[in-house]
């Protein structure tokens, strides 16, 4: 799981009216996941992706660019309904 996704989970959970239930869910499931953290290699890939998308006139949200960079770095697909990931070269999107 990209560390950025984990941050988005924490953000969403903290503002949810179901906070207690979602915190319990995350506590149960987080130990099953390996958290992919941002490194200098990730930052390099991020910059490459962001520049290519800007030049093509197809920018995507910044956090999604970071997620795409981590997925490309670790050769992992991104699990998302967001079609804008489809414009990122080298990242496979799985729709759920």
Image (cartoon, rainbow, N blue to C red):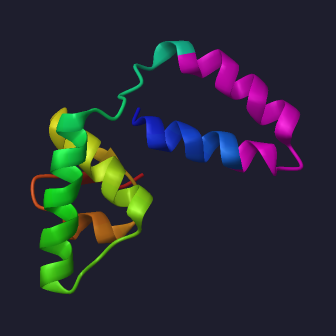
Q: Is residue 35 above or below residue 62?
A: above
Q: Position of residue 41 (x, y in %)?
A: 17, 36
Which residue corresponds to the image point at 34% horizontal and 35% vertical from the top-left?
A: 38
Give the dominant element type of the magenta stretch: helix, strand or loop.
Answer: helix
Label tally: 0
Asked whether 79 or 43 is in front, the reply is 43
Height in image: 32 above or below 14? above
Residue nearer the viewer, 96 or 23? 23
Q: Is residue 72 above or below residue 83?
A: above
Q: Position of residue 10 (x, y in %)?
A: 67, 39
Residue 20 occupies which quadrant of the picture? top right
User: Quick one: which residue is furthest to the top in this view?
Assistant: 31
Kindly tell me whether residue 78 is visible in this rendering: yes
Question: Magenta stretch?
Answer: 12-30
Question: Residue placed at 13% from the left, 59% from the top?
Answer: 48
Residue sitting nearer the eye, 29 or 36: 36
Q: Is residue 87 left or right of residue 84?
A: left
Q: Is residue 24 magenta?
A: yes
Q: Quadrant of the N terminus?
A: top left
Q: Most extreme residue toward the front, as rendered? A: 40
In the rendered image, residue 78 lying in the magenta stretch gets the answer: no
Q: Is residue 76 visible?
A: no
The residue that appears at 33% across and 70% down in the rendered structure is: 83
Residue 60 as seen in the image, left or right of residue 40 = right
Q: Nearer the viewer, residue 39 or 15?
A: 39
Where residue 76 appears, as percent x and y from the top left, is: 22, 37
Residue 72: image x %, image y %?
Answer: 17, 44
């Amino acid at each position: 799981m990209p560390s950025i996704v984990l941050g988005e989970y924490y953000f969403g959970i903290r503002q949810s009216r179901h906070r207690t239930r979602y915190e319990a869910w995350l506590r149960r499931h987080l130990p099953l996941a390996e958290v992919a953290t941002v490194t200098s290699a990730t930052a390099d890939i991020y910059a490459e992706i962001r520049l290519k998308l800007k030049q093509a006139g197809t920018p995507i949200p910044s956090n999604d660019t970071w997620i795409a960079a981590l997925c490309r770095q670790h050769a992992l697909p991104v699990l998302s309904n967001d079609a804008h990931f489809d414009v990122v070269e080298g990242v496979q999107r799985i729709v759920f």
